[in-house]
Every structure is written in structure tokens, then in C-alpha cells.
């Protein structure tokens, strides 16, 4: 006689991005296959599962749960509790339980999957040519969710009643559209207000199209038509900042850019971000991308079609198109039909709209590959609102971020939920978007902050909001937040050397910092090194006019009497400028690395002005090209005087600009290595917008690593100010 098999019952909870990705049908199929009984339910913290059956089948279930789960799912924690068997019968998918704490991750919007794409291209399929096709593996999520748990009545799809066919798919656990909340077809779902063919015609004739995309309106025009691109720039008031291009296929991308395996994987990922690529030099096959698309950048921002609507449009018009957010420069992206017609009327020649409401604005994300992995520049569609897991339990903190490239964040337990990119808080529109992003995050997660974390800066709009909130405020120094964000997402333990190089952040001494080395331990920082401070004549104006920083450094290096003429503006500016620098009138002190880049770019004749933040630094990086040298200018203890002398000498002798640019970058790396050696802690964390410079980041990391340092850089949030809300949340949540 054989013994009855041992029966086990497990209660399993999963947290993370586990809703709306086909997790429940997957568990249903797996349990049924293994003849296990039990149930699965979405809950407000994620997913709850119970299985009961033979011990070995239960073990097999756990094993396959990890290995075969749906690809878009992100499991943050998996808790398994053994409970007494109670003789469960059958397997059921239970109704969502919304009584518990709401920390279930809302998924980001997911790019169209291959199965759905083949359906919309198949004339015999009922979804042929249907631009709102989706399934449990793809389609809109964050852009349609109004509340959690993520169920259809809690989305902007609630106005569309499922037809009989769609309902059958939606309720059949074996169907790949089982509980696909935005499920729709031409009979029952959203529809377009105008035709794709006419839109293609507008593009072909050089017109500008406003397309209602996933997270907001985009402005499109033919990327190979310089006149159309010029028109778009003029109407959008965007003079030089690079524009992103949507290309019909990966083959089309290869015709215009160099694409590594890692870059291709990012382009084709469910997030489908804009990826910064190296454009191919020389003439390309077919039509060239117009020079005015991204002339001021060493890179081209490229993405693939990510929604059925984009796929269908790119079939009708198979040519690269500029795809930029539908707004005036620096305003939030338009999401509402009436609002778009009003705001974009002067910009677009045609609208391609539909009646699926967008719950919140979410721009296209921007990433690049650096150090062999993903390096975020702008985190929005496809990423927001995924959380970042942190090491310690946090107090309920709302972090309101910085001023430029603002994002906000909330800390819940061991997770920080980061908003999508909001923008620069200079306009009333962006400040409104900032406030609604805060309200939105708090409502979605039923979150009540006990603390607000903000920047130390006295004039940031975000900090002013925090101080008016009526909640206890914790001010976090800007660069401390930068390095804490990078440390948090990498799980770096203290002590570490935090290196924060950027344009500007308010320092503890009221000086504008920006080249900071912090020894971070016990949640406090000690400022161990920085550039020698210099005056910035004209203050803010100097951000756009790099020659001002150059003038100041020349004056300090050579003395006002002996400034080399060819590098300095002529009278009458000269006298005024010298007075400003000498007396420090309207010439605040700074240790900004960004401004040192501007100064060197100006002296080297690469760029004397910047139309957008970082333009001069990008131009200087581009000068290096493929040159590889270990030569470096002197930068003893962060004193730039010998460096400025050497740059001036190089320019006078007609030295190759590539060499000047490389020696300057190398000087920064050598200084970094020296400071790291002096501080002597093993872990080095690199943050701040200056590290978006790939040459600098990769060289710094490899030089440090070959000297036995362990180097961490950003992988989940931007190194620019878009990432500091995470650092603020982590630091404030610990106190
Ligand atoms: Zn799909
Ligand atoms: Zn239908
Ligand atoms: Fe910064």
C-alpha cells in the first residue's frame, strides 16, 4: 500500500508591477495544469494566491511561478506562508479585494506586443487596422488608470461597454485578453476622429500633425524635410534643442544611426523609449534626416512606433518623422481634446484625435546606453510610476523634487514611487502640473504624507509649495539628494564617496555649488572637495552665455590687466564686466562644474552660447569624437587656473580642438581619482547632470575601477534633477 501524498497549502503574496500583465490567467493556467486547487486575486498591495495540492506539485508551482511569469511583470517581493490544508476545491479567480493598503504598483504603458501587431496587420482579423488593440501584455496602463486596484471601472475605458466578443475574451482565463482592462475592438472600443491616410498625406506635403498618443499629444512632421522641421521649430518656439525622431522599423534606424545590441533591446523594449544614438557619418541610404532635427547634439534621439496608432501611421507613411511633445516649449504636454485644439491650433495643420481619455500627461521617455546598461535621461512613459525598492522602511514622505526637470515622489514602506517627468517649474502651467502630479500620486496610493522633503534653495517653486503645505518640512541639500538617489537605486551602503557634478544647487554656505565631493556616512555628508569658487557675472544669464564664465576665469587667472585680448569681449563691455567680477556685484560665487564646461567650450571656440541647458557641454564632448588619449590638463586640488592657462595656450598654438576637449575631460577624471584616493572609501557614487556626458562617465568609471574602486552610476532614475526627488524621499524618510 502506498502512502497518501503529502498535501500542502501555501498563501503567497506578490508585490510590484503584477497587475494588468496577465499574471492571474498565468497562475490559473499553471495551477490547473498541475491539478492544484485554490484561488488568485488582485489586491491593493499586489497579488494574493493560495494553492493546495500534492507537496511536489506545490513545489513545482513555486519554481515555475518564478521562471515562467509574464515578461512585463516586475516582482518586488514574494512572501510564501505555509498554512494548514483545508481541502480547497477547484481553482478560481476571485474578485479584487480593495480593502487593503494600496501599494500595488500601477504598471507603466506598454508598447504593442508582436501578437497584437500581427492582428492589426491581418485583413482577416476582426481587429485589422484597429488602432486601440491591446492585450494583457501590452497597451495603455498608467495613462488610463484613475484608481487602483487596476480594474476596468477604475480606468478611462469605463465609458466603453465590452461587446459580446470582447467580453468573452475578457472573461476567459485561457484567452490572452483575459482581464485586459483596455480590451477593445472596432465594434465597442474607442475610435479615431479622422483618417490615418489623410494624416499621412499631410505629413507628405510638409504639414505638421498633432497626434493624440498614449500619454499626450505629439507634434509630428517629416524628419527628412528641413522646411517642415523649421516650421515646427518656429511654431513651437523651440530654436535649437534636438528633436526626437520616430522611425518605422529597426532597419530604418540602422540606415541612419549606429545601433548596438543593448540599444536595439531598449528600442524594442515594452517601455519603447527615445534612445540617444550616434548618427552615422556621411551620406545614408535613402533620404537623410534634416540637419535641423538635432544639429546641436552629438546624438540623435530615436524611437520605434509603440502604439497601434503609431504602427498604422508609419505603415501609411513609412518614413522617419519628428515626434515631439505637443506643447509650447517648456509647457506640459496637452492631453485633453478640447485643450489640445485650443493650445495647438496655431501649431498643427491637422489633428489625429480619438475618444479614449488620457488620465494624466506622460511624455516620451529618453534613455541612452552607458557603461553597458540603461542610463535614464527623462523618465516618463514606459517607466512611471514604477517604484524603486529601498533598503530601509521609510516614514511616509512626499518629496517635491527640484526646480528644473521636476519630478515628485512618495515613499511607502520600502518603496519610492516616482512621478513621470513634469518639467521646469518656470511657468504657471508647469506649476499646475506639478500640483496635480502630487495630488494624483497621493490619491492613487491613498497616501497621506507626514513629512514633505524639498530642496534647500530659498526660491524654488517646489520648495515654496512644501513650506506652504502645512506639513513638517525637511530641507535636503541639492547634491546630497543627487548622490543619495544614486546610492538608493543601487543599494549602496554608507560610507561612500558621493560625487555630484551639475549646473547649480544651493549650497549650505549660500554659494551655488556644482562640483561636489561628499563623504557620506550616517545619513550626513562632509564636503571633502570642490572646484575653486569663481564669480559668475550676470548670474542666471551666464547659463546661456558661456563666455561670461570664461571671462571670469580669465580675469582670475591672468589678472584684469593681462587678459589675452582675443578671448575677452571688447570695450565697453570689458570695463563693466571686470567691475562686476572684481566687486562681486551681480556676480554670485559658484563651484559649478556645468559653468566650467561652458567656460572651456567658449575658450576653445566650440560654443560661446547655449540655447538650452547643457548645449555647450554637449558640443565639447562631441569635439572629442573618436580620439583616445590619456593626456590631461592640470587641475591641482580643483584649482582651474593652471587648466585655463593651458587651454588658452593650446588655442593660441592652434591645437586640435579634439585634443583640447579630451585633455579637459581627462583633467576632471584625474582629479576625481586623486580625491577618491585621498578619501579612501571603496564605494564611489557618480551623480548630477554633468555625468550625462558619456565620455566623462565611462572614463571616470573605468579609471576608478582599475584603481579598485567600486563605482555606481544611475540605472533607474536620471542623474539630472529628474532624479533628486528619490534622494530627498530616502533621506527624509530615514530621519
Ligand atoms: Zn498585445
Ligand atoms: Zn469589442
Ligand atoms: Fe542638480
Image (cartoon, rainbow, N blue to C red):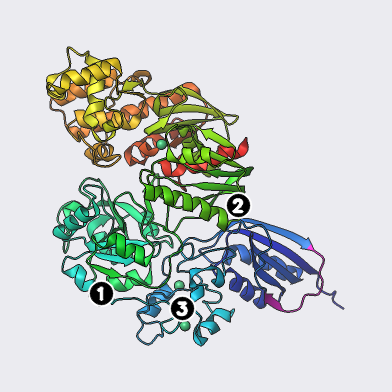
Quarter containing the N terminus: bottom right
SS state under label 2 = loop
Please say if the residues under marks 1 and 3 sit with CB atoms less than 8 Å apart: no
x 19%, y 33%: residue: 608
Q: Position of residue 218 (x, y in %)?
A: 31, 61
596 falls in the magenta region: no
x 29%, y 50%: residue: 329
Upstream in sequence: badge 2 or badge 3: 3
x 29%, y 72%: residue: 313
Q: Which residue is mark 3?
A: 184
Residue 602: which quarter of the image?
A: top left
**Separation of residues labelled 2 and 3 (CA atoms):** 32 Å
Mark 1 residue crowding within 10 angstroms, few (<14) / some (14–19) / many (20+): some
**Separation of residues labelled 1 and 2 (CA atoms):** 45 Å
Please say if the residues under marks 1 and 2 sit with CB atoms less than 8 Å apart: no
Q: From the image, state whether disc 2 or disc 3 is nearer to you.
A: 2
From this view, report whether residue 540 is shown above or below residue 119.
above
Q: Which residues are magenta?
A: 83-93
Q: Which residue is mark 1?
A: 316
From this view, report whether residue 86 is shown above or below residue 681.
below
Mark 2 residue crowding within 10 angstroms, few (<14) / some (14–19) / many (20+): many
Upstream in sequence: badge 1 or badge 2: 1
Q: Is mark 3 within 8 Å of ligand 2?
A: yes
Q: Position of residue 692 (x, y in %)?
A: 36, 41
**In front: 619, or 572?**
572
From this view, report whether residue 249 is shown above or below residue 578.
below
SS state under label 3 = loop
Upstream in sequence: badge 1 or badge 3: 3
Residue 386 visible (yes or no)? no
- Which numbered circle lies on residue 447? 2
Amino acid at each position: 500500500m502506498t502512502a497518501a501524498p503529502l498535501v500542502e497549502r501555501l498563501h503567497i503574496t506578490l508585490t510590484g508591477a503584477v497587475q494588468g500583465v496577465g499574471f492571474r490567467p498565468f497562475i490559473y493556467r499553471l495551477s490547473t495544469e498541475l491539478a492544484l486547487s485554490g484561488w488568485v486575486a488582485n489586491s491593493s498591495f499586489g497579488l494574493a494566491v493560495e494553492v493546495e495540492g500534492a507537496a511536489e506539485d506545490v513545489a513545482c508551482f513555486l519554481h515555475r511561478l518564478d521562471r515562467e511569469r509574464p515578461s512585463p511583470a516586475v516582482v518586488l517581493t514574494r512572501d510564501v506562508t505555509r498554512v494548514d490544508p483545508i481541502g480547497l476545491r477547484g481553482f478560481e479567480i476571485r474578485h479584487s479585494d480593495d480593502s487593503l493598503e494600496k501599494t500595488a504598483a500601477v504598471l507603466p504603458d506598454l508598447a504593442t506586443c508582436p501578437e497584437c501587431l500581427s492582428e492589426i496587420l491581418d485583413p482577416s482579423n476582426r481587429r485589422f487596422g484597429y488602432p486601440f488593440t491591446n492585450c494583457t501584455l501590452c497597451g495603455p496602463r498608467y495613462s488610463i488608470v484613475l484608481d487602483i486596484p487596476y480594474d476596468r471601472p477604475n480606468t478611462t475605458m469605463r465609458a466603453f461597454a465590452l461587446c459580446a466578443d470582447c467580453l468573452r475574451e475578457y472573461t476567459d482565463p485561457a484567452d490572452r485578453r483575459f482581464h485586459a482592462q483596455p480590451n477593445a475592438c472596432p465594434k465597442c472600443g474607442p475610435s479615431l476622429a479622422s483618417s490615418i491616410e489623410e494624416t499621412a498625406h499631410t505629413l507628405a506635403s510638409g504639414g505638421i500633425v498633432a497626434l493624440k498618443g498614449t500619454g499626450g499629444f505629439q507634434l509630428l512632421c517629416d524628419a527628412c524635410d528641413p522646411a517642415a522641421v523649421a516650421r515646427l521649430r518656429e511654431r513651437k518656439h523651440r530654436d535649437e534643442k534636438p528633436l526626437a525622431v520616430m522611425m518605422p522599423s529597426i532597419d530604418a534606424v540602422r540606415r541612419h544611426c549606429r545601433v548596438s545590441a543593448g540599444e536595439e533591446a531598449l528600442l524594442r523594449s515594452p517601455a519603447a523609449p527615445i534612445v540617444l544614438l550616434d548618427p552615422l557619418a556621411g551620406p545614408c541610404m535613402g533620404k537623410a534626416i534634416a540637419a535641423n532635427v538635432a544639429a546641436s547634439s552629438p546624438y540623435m534621439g530615436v524611437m520605434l512606433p509603440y502604439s497601434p496608432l503609431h504602427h498604422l501611421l508609419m505603415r501609411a507613411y513609412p518614413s522617419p518623422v519628428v515626434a515631439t511633445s505637443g506643447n509650447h516649449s517648456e509647457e506640459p504636454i496637452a492631453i485633453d481634446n478640447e485643450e489640445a485644439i485650443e493650445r495647438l491650433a496655431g501649431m498643427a495643420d491637422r489633428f489625429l484625435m480619438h475618444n479614449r481619455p488620457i488620465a494624466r500627461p506622460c511624455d516620451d521617455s529618453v534613455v541612452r546606453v552607458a557603461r553597458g546598461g540603461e542610463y535614464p535621461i527623462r523618465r516618463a512613459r514606459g517607466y512611471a510610476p514604477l517604484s524603486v525598492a529601498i533598503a530601509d522602511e521609510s516614514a511616509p514622505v512626499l518629496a517635491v523634487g527640484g526646480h528644473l526637470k521636476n519630478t515628485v515622489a512618495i515613499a511607502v514602506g520600502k518603496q519610492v514611487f516616482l512621478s513621470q517627468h513634469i518639467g521646469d517649474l518656470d511657468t504657471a502651467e508647469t506649476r499646475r502640473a506639478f500640483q496635480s502630479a502630487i495630488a494624483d500620486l497621493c490619491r492613487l496610493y491613498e497616501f497621506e504624507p507626514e513629512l514633505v522633503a524639498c530642496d534647500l534653495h530659498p526660491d524654488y517653486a517646489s520648495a515654496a509649495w512644501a513650506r506652504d503645505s502645512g506639513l513638517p518640512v525637511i530641507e535636503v541639500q541639492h547634491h546630497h539628494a543627487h548622490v543619495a538617489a544614486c546610492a538608493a537605486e543601487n543599494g549602496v551602503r554608507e560610507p561612500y564617496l558621493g560625487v555630484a557634478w551639475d549646473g547649480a544647487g544651493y549650497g549650505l554656505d549660500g554659494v551655488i555649488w556644482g562640483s561636489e565631493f561628499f563623504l557620506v556616512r550616517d545619513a550626513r555628508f562632509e564636503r571633502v572637495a570642490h572646484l575653486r569658487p569663481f564669480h559668475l557675472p550676470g548670474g542666471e544669464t551666464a547659463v546661456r552665455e558661456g563666455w561670461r564664465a570664461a571671462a571670469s576665469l580669465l580675469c582670475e587667472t591672468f589678472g584684469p590687466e593681462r587678459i589675452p585680448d582675443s578671448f575677452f569681449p571688447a570695450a565697453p563691455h570689458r570695463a563693466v564686466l571686470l567691475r562686476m567680477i572684481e566687486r562681486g556685484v551681480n556676480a554670485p560665487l559658484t563651484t559649478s562644474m556645468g559653468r566650467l564646461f561652458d567656460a572651456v567650450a567658449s575658450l576653445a571656440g566650440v560654443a560661446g552660447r547655449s540655447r538650452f541647458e547643457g548645449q555647450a557641454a554637449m558640443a565639447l564632448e562631441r569635439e572629442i569624437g573618436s580620439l583616445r588619449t590619456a593626456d590631461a590638463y592640470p587641475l591641482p586640488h580643483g584649482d582651474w587656473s593652471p587648466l585655463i592657462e593651458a587651454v588658452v595656450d593650446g588655442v593660441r598654438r592652434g591645437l586640435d580642438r579634439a585634443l583640447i576637449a579630451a585633455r579637459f575631460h581627462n583633467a576632471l577624471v584625474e582629479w576625481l581619482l586623486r580625491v577618491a584616493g585621498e578619501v579612501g572609501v571603496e564605494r564611489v557614487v557618480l551623480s548630477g547632470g554633468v555625468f550625462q556626458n558619456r565620455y566623462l562617465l565611462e572614463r571616470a568609471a573605468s579609471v576608478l575601477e582599475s584603481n579598485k574602486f567600486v563605482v555606481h552610476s544611475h540605472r533607474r532614475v536620471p542623474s539630472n534633477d529628474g532624479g533628486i526627488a528619490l534622494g530627498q524621499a530616502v533621506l527624509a524618510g530615514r530621519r
